[in-house]
Amino acid sequence: MKIDKNVEEDGVIFMSIKDSDSVEAGSDASGHKEPENGGEGDVTILAIESSCDETAAAVVRNGREVLSNIISSQIALHTVYGGVVPEIASRKHVEKINGCVRAALSEAGLTLDDIDAVAVTYGPGLVGALLVGVSEAKAISFATGKPLIGVHHIEGHISANFIENKDLEPPFVCLVVSGGHSHLVVVKDYGVYEIIGQTRDDAAGEAFDKVARAIGLGYPGGPKIDAAAREGNPDAFSFPQAKIPDAEYDFSFSGLKSSVLNLINQAKMQGQELSQADVAASFQKAVVEVLTSHAIKACKEYGYDKLAIAGGVASNTALRTLMEKECAANNIRFYRPSPVFCTDNAAMIGAAAYYEYRKGVRFGLDLNAVPNLPLGDRERRFHADKR
Ligand code: KG4
Ligand code: ZN
């Protein structure tokens, strides 16, 4: 994997991620791989993602081959405010989206004529941010007459696992841990999900972000705690790991967060200095242990021998290490996307869209952003118009 980065004048980071696999045999100079069957039956999708603070576009063939993957990250712009400012996010998406789509097509060595469908995240997420991607995708669909596929953001995160694991097929268990979601899901088939556990309060990523702010690490909390924890002692403090008696696969992180805040306040009152690294490592250990034990238990009790992780928190080093160890000890095959496919990107949306396309999902130009779109049980449109 090769990542070309360019910091633009406004502080936005423009990234082009090149999957080294796609540039192997059969590639031309642009990295564009000729399909083995001469193109018959291949489905090439232009995918767009703008649900939070990343503007992204990608071209994905047959759900698993990433021809291009462009991410324009606004993270630096929001850092000064300590979190994502929705209005700034929407405005930047408007400025960046055409450039991202153009770059995705040109890096794939394709034009809109070569695309079979355009896919876009339509929820969940920030409504103003989602609307930019949805409008872009609808405009392209209208102008080209190509089918439009609305994709669920979390289904995209789960599908990121298909990109680098060509052998992975449902059914499997997936732990989805992002800034807004913590779900334990059985992926029964492509696009068919059974939620077996979810958070009762904060999402795992949200807990990372709040604790990072409290200990003075700032935004974005996840990567900063991950880095600080490497220098700290995970056994320095013992933080609670919530168990919910009537729902053993559900999560709760608010008690853990309060416990960290109490520790900080107590130390302040007593004039003691706390080690940021020790707090980060101990907090991270509590989160990672509860996520891992729930996921392993679900695999064993539901009888699945494949476990995947997805979402921004899935890039956490300690989570990946513990999951790997526990899966090996329990004879479970462990799947995890590379970190760049864990955080928001459009390649994962193209992967999810392919399986929707194959099922005949086609949205009309009345597609709208749905900020609280539910996972699993959502309305899909089939051949909404004649395209
Ligand atoms: O999936 P994502 O990019 O966006 C959402 O859909 O929410 O997830 C963002 C979340 C943030 O809360 C961020 O702090 C967390 O993922 N995150 C991490 C790491 N990298 C990102 N959390 C823990 N460790 C990391 N290395
Ligand atoms: Zn996400």
Image (cartoon, grey):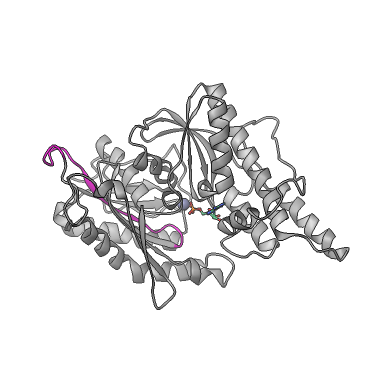
Q: Tell me the quarter of the picture where residue 13 sits.
A: bottom left
Q: Which residues are magenta?
A: 36-53
Residue closer to the observer: 159 or 128: 159
Which percent across, then down, holds residue 151?
36, 47
Residue closer to the observer: 213 or 217: 217
Vertically, is 71 above or below 355? below
- Residue drawn at x 46%, y 59% as measured from the top left: 52
Which percent across, then down, holds residue 128?
43, 63
Vertically, is 60 above or below 132? above
Relative horizontal placement of residue 101, taking residue 278 as reference (left or right): left
- Residue drawn at x 48%, y 47% as measured from the top left: 311
- Residue drawn at x 88%, y 63% as measured from the top left: 270
- As for residue 369 lying within the magenta part, the answer is no
Main SS category, magenta section: loop
Which percent across, then down, holds residue 9?
40, 78
Relative horizontal placement of residue 198, taking residue 153 as reference (left or right): right
Which percent across, then down, holds residue 77?
49, 71
Relative horizontal placement of residue 300, taking residue 90 as reference (left or right): right
